[in-house]
Amino acid sequence: MGDIAQAESLFRAALKEAPSLPAAHARLGMALEARGDLGQAEVELKRGLEGLPNDADAALALARVYARTDRPEDAFEAFRNAASRERTGSRALLDAGTYALSLSRNTLAQAFLEKAVERSPESAAAQARFADALLARGDKEQAKRHYKLALAAQGPVDRVDIQRRLDALK
């Protein structure tokens, strides 16, 4: 938490010197979101995005604010916007799919996660979460395939848990 408080302090100081600096608003909003001050985070993120409309990190943080404040439709729209701003990777798509799964919106989750896998086929997290969505929709064969791909892919995931899920499908 010390790093977040320090970042928040630095961005507040920057805004005292240059109140209209969009990057400082966006980064302050991200620090506030991480700290859990969601109302103020939303305000700062929106200010930042007004001046930096292509800031993928700020757009993703705003999507998470909407998700954490139980505004799913706003969150899904913001996740789509964040995904369109990401030049590489699939963080926004992965977060959107995970959020959709948490709401049992399995078809939507599958759509987000399929795009995440298309964009980042080497991502173990994307493969595993896509397998979860497939399984939630009853497609055990494709879920097995993607759990296996997750085990062979790169990135930090709980491989023991993925293997357990895979074994449960046999």
Image (cartoon, grey):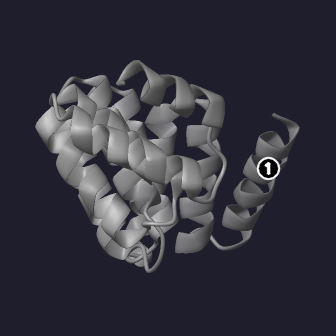
Residue 103 visible (yes or no) = yes
Q: Could you tell me which residue is drawn at 35 percent across and 24 percent down?
A: 169
Q: Disc 1 marks which residue?
A: 9
Whole-percent x and y of residue 34? 62, 39
Q: Could you tell me which residue is drawn at 54 percent across and 62 percent down?
A: 26
- Say if 28 sits above or below 144 in the image: below
The one nearer the camera, 141 or 129, is 141
**The furthest residue to the front:** 170
Tag 1 secondary structure: helix
Whole-percent x and y of residue 112? 25, 52
Whole-percent x and y of residue 87? 44, 80
- Say if 11 sits above or below 168 in the image: below
Q: Could you tell me which residue is drawn at 35 percent across and 47 percent down?
A: 145
Whole-percent x and y of residue 128? 44, 43
Quarter occupied by residue 129: top left
- Say if 128 sits above or below 89 in the image: above
The three-letter amino acid code for the residue at tag 1 is Ser
Q: Is residue 106 left or right of residue 101?
A: left
The one nearer the camera, 108 or 12, is 108
Q: Could you tell me which residue is drawn at 46 percent across and 24 percent down?
A: 167
